[in-house]
Image (cartoon, coloured by chain):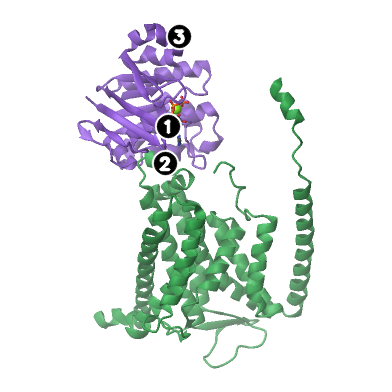
């Protein structure tokens, strides 16, 4: 098991955002986390990457307990979190943003290789290397955020709404890129509003409702579940 | 449709008071600039060499302020804190060098180990060692202050850290003024090397023999002036390189913009903040030693006015901007020297703070600053 989340309880002050959720990810999987706005999807990712501390419960990664490990060290263990809303460093150039993605790494040649790989996925970024992150279009920023998340060479990447604000063609493209990243050996935890798309590339999925997991299973089964269909897929 | 209606019905934002204020401010500034240009012009015409000497003394102060202002602006850039204890770190730098030179004759250490070393080389190496030790002490002091006094308040309202900074500043000044620490007296500073001065007149550059006066219409300058100018410019270039080109510098900018996301990249935010304090303190310490050598008197309160003026310089240049701090500091040096030369010496400090008030009224973001981001 690559990631094992057990009985997580997370609070924002008095708000009980995650109410004892448990799930896991196997090596090589794409797992989707779907749910309505405010269900706690982003909170789950923030807790895994160490930005939030759970009040109780545990997160194990590659067999090690990382529940209280600081965020900056969790990246070094191999988890990369591409946060909701892109969170590009606006005053840094595209190149500098990518370099910050590789902050935990030292070998310049290896970093350059990763950067070249990002350019294969997102050729647009290569054209804009010296442009400031804040001046990119929304879609370009999303590409940069995803590319930056790849730069730490993670074994697990947490993607929070990677298709947000992208045109339909780009949405298709970004899902292809996610599949490609996965096929090169990176496991993926995917949070998406576009549940149908997400499910179509996932192995398994969990459905989150107000801080609890209410349904889990194979992506195909979830996709065909009548309740999910009416609530999240709009079919 | 509904939305547009609501927008049309809402009262238009009233811009008038701000616009008229800006207009008054502009008119005032134009009048002030004309007056200044007139004053400077007549004085330049009256006595060009006096004018040049005043500009040079302003440059010397400005280059010292630049070394202090960098620390204000970098720390503000990264933690949004005006570190009022920064001027006192400058003072500690001067005192450390004083003890090293006066008590321990430390600038002579190379001669003890290498008796054959030429005296000139001894002085250079010795002085550099004194400066480096002063810088190290300042770095330790500032990073300790950061850890003990500011870090616990990082998530508190900004005003809490600001008040703490003022408290730390008073503590350093009055603790330093205790008799068994630095004492409250003005202490004549023993220089690690002799100040040599030159004058330029129509016939070239001549050195000034100690105890004699240069001719009336000569332009004079000293070795310490040259050192301060060169060092301050080198510091500026170094920082520009650090912030633009190195991984640490890019991380500093990332942390300054968005701390949680910086952590997601694997950046240790606490470490980067400590590093920023350390860099600022190192250059404040360096400035403190050079200031003491140039003006040859030290006191535990010596950091207050240069510190405040460097702070005004940072605001004038656009707080958070490194080139801004440098340009602001040079302007402050000139404002002060010209006031001393052509208006009156006691006015120098009043002018410095008048500049602060004018900047805050007319262009609070300073020369290089960008208007503050609404969401930040
Ligand atoms: N910083 C915060 N302070 C207080 N409450 C918060 C905070 N962040 C999130 N919440 C609350 O926690 C709950 C879960 O939020 P979360 O952002 O995890 O939802 P989400 O599933 O990602 O939603 P969305 O699809 O809209 O992004 C929500 O009710 C939200 O209001
Ligand atoms: Mg979310």
Location of residue A196 in the rendering, given as x and y in whole percent from the top left corner: 43, 12
Considering the numbered disc 1 on the image, is that residue within a helix, a strand or a loop? loop
Tell me where residue B278 sits by quadrant: bottom left
Horizontally, residue B61 falls left or right of residue B278, namely right
Q: Colour of chain A?
A: purple
Residue A51, label in figure: none
Q: Is residue A131 visible?
A: no
- Compare residues A160 and A67 and report the one nearer the observer: A67
Horizontally, residue B107 falls left or right of residue A139, namely left
- The residue labelled by disc 1 is A83
Horizontally, residue A61 falls left or right of residue B227, namely left
Callout 1: chain: A
Considering the numbered disc 2 on the image, is that residue within a helix, a strand or a loop? helix
Decide: marks 1, 2 in contact (CB < 8 A)? yes
In front: label 3 or label 2: 3
In the image, residue B348 sits, relative to residue A23, either above or below, namely below
In front: label 3 or label 1: 3
Neighbours of disc 2 within 10 Å: few (<14), some (14-19), many (20+): some
- The residue labelled by disc 3 is A230
Q: Colour of chain B?
A: green
Considering the numbered disc 3 on the image, is that residue within a helix, a strand or a loop? helix
- The residue labelled by disc 2 is B260
Q: Are marks 3 and 2 on the same chain?
A: no
State the residue lying farthest toward the bottom.
B211
- For the point 28% across and 40% down, the residue is A68
State the separation of the CA atoms marked 3 and 1. 28 Å
């Amino acid at each position: 098991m690559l990631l094992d989340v057990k009985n997580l309880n997370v609070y924002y002050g008095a708000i009980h955002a995650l109410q004892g959720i448990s799930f896991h990810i196997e090596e090589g999987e794409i797992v989707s986390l779907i749910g309505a706005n405010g269900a706690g999807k982003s909170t789950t990712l923030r807790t895994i990457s160490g930005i939030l501390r759970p009040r109780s419960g545990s997160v194990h990664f590659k067999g090690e307990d990382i529940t209280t490990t600081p965020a900056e060290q969790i990246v070094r263990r191999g988890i990369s979190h591409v946060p909701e809303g892109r969170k590009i460093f606006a005053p840094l150039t595209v190149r500098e943003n990518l370099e910050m993605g590789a902050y935990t790494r030292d070998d310049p040649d290896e970093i350059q290789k990763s950067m070249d790989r990002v350019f294969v996925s997102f050729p647009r970024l290569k054209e804009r290397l010296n442009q400031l992150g804040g001046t990119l279009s929304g879609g370009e920023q999303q590409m940069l955020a995803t590319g930056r998340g790849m730069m730490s060479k993670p074994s697990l990447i947490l993607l929070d709404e990677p298709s947000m604000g992208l045109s339909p063609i780009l949405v298709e493209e970004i899902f292809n890129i996610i599949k490609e990243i996965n096929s090169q050996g990176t496991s993926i935890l995917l949070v998406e509003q576009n549940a149908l798309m997400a499910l179509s590339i996932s192995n398994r999925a969990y459905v989150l409702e107000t801080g609890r997991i209410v349904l889990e299973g194979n992506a195909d089964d979830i996709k065909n579940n009548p309740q999910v269909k009416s609530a999240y897929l709009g079919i | 449709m509904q939305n547009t209606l609501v927008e049309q019905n809402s009262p238009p934002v009233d811009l008038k008071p701000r616009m008229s204020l800006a207009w008054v401010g502009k008119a005032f500034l134009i009048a002030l600039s004309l007056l200044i240009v007139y004053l400077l012009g007549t004085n330049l015409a009256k006595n060009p060499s006096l004018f040049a000497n005043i500009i040079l003394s302003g440059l010397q102060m400005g280059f010292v302020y630049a070394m202090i202002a960098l620390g204000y602006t970098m720390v503000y850039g990264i933690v949004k804190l005006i570190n009022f204890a920064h001027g006192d770190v400058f003072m500690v730098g001067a005192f450390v060098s004083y003890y090293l030179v006066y008590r321990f004759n430390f600038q002579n250490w190379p001669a003890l180990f290498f008796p054959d070393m030429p005296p000139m080389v001894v002085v250079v190496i010795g002085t550099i060692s004194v400066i480096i030790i002063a810088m190290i002490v300042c770095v330790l002091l500032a990073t300790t202050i950061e850890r003990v006094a500011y870090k616990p308040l990082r998530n508190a309202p900004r005003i809490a850290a600001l008040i703490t900074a003022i408290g730390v500043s008073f503590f350093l000044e009055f603790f330093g003024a205790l008799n068994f620490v630095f004492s409250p007296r003005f202490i004549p500073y023993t220089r690690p090397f002799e100040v040599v001065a030159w004058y330029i007149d129509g016939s070239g550059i001549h050195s000034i023999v100690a105890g004699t006066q240069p001719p009336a219409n000569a332009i004079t300058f000293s070795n310490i002036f040259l050192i301060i100018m060169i060092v301050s410019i080198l510091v500026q270039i170094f920082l520009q390189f650090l912030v633009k080109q190195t991984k640490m510098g890019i991380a500093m900018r990332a942390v300054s913009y968005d701390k949680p996301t910086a952590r997601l990249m694997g950046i240790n935010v606490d470490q980067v903040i400590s590093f920023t304090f350390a860099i600022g303190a190192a250059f404040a310490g360096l400035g403190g030693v050079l200031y003491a050598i140039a003006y040859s008197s030290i006191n535990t309160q010596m950091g207050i006015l240069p510190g405040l003026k460097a702070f005004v310089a940072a605001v004038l240049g656009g707080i958070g901007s490194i080139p801004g701090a440098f340009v602001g500091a040079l302007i402050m040096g000139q404002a002060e020297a010209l006031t001393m030369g052509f208006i009156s010496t006691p006015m120098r400090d009043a002018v410095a703070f008048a500049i602060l008030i004018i900047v805050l009224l007319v262009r609070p973001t300073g020369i290089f600053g960008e208007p503050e981001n609404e969401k930040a």
